[in-house]
Amino acid sequence: MSFLDKLLLWLHIGFAIFAIGPVTGATMFTPRYIRAKDAGVLRYLHRTTRIFGILTLGVFLFGLALGGSALGKPYLSISMTLFIVAAVLLVIIERDQRAAVRVLANETPEDDAKVQTGRIATLSSIMALIWLVILVLMVWFNP
């Protein structure tokens, strides 16, 4: 393994740890603060989701660079497809967080942000499971 491959591997793993972990935590905590009607914390979680969601693209990009000629292997194709599905779920979660922040900041009694709690909780759980499946594929099937 060359120095460049080792560097790409370290960057891939580093981005996976420091980007996917926080974005998963932020999305998982969002329903709790929607129910508590804490708009300040919800704004922070939304900003965290946006920033670390963008950083998760680094995991994908460094993984592509690291995969190189082996991208046709089934475990890599499945992992990349699952990553794209998780990224789409993340975009939907971010949209729902933005709607919840808007509704809670409005402070109108008839507006209720609890509509988003179920969808955010479900999608963030599915997204976390997808990250775990990708981890298993990378560790178990990687030669």
Image: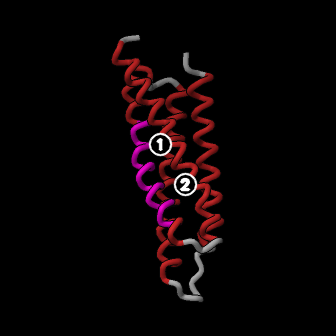
Spatial CA span between label 2 and label 1: 11 Å
- Which x, y percent locates residue 27? 56, 56
**Dots 2 and 1: beta carbons under 8 Å?**
no
User: Would you say residue 52 sits in the magenta stretch?
Assistant: yes
Viewer-proximal residue, 134 or 110? Answer: 110
143 sits to left or right of 64: right
Q: Residue at x 56, y 49 (%)?
A: 24
Give the colour scheme of this rendering.
secondary structure
SS for callout 2: helix
- Mark 2: amino acid: Ala
Q: Residue at x 57, y 71 (%)?
A: 38
- Crowd around label 1: few <14 · some 14–19 · many ≥20 (10 Å): many
Which residue is outermost to the left?
Answer: 4
Question: Which quadrant would residue 67 be assigned to in this image?
Answer: top left
User: Would you say residue 106 sits in the magenta stretch?
Assistant: no
- Which x, y percent locates residue 19? 47, 42
| Above or below 134: residue 32 | below
SS for callout 1: helix
The residue carrying mark 2 is 26
Q: Residue at x 51, y 60 (%)?
A: 45
The residue carrying mark 1 is 19
- Mark 1: amino acid: Ala
- Which x, y percent locates residue 28? 61, 55
* Disc with the residue nearer the chain's start (2 vs 1): 1
| Dominant secondary-structure state across the stretch colored magenta | helix
65 sits to left or right of 128: left
Residues shaded magenta:
42-60
- Crowd around label 2: few <14 · some 14–19 · many ≥20 (10 Å): many
| Above or below 4: residue 114 | below
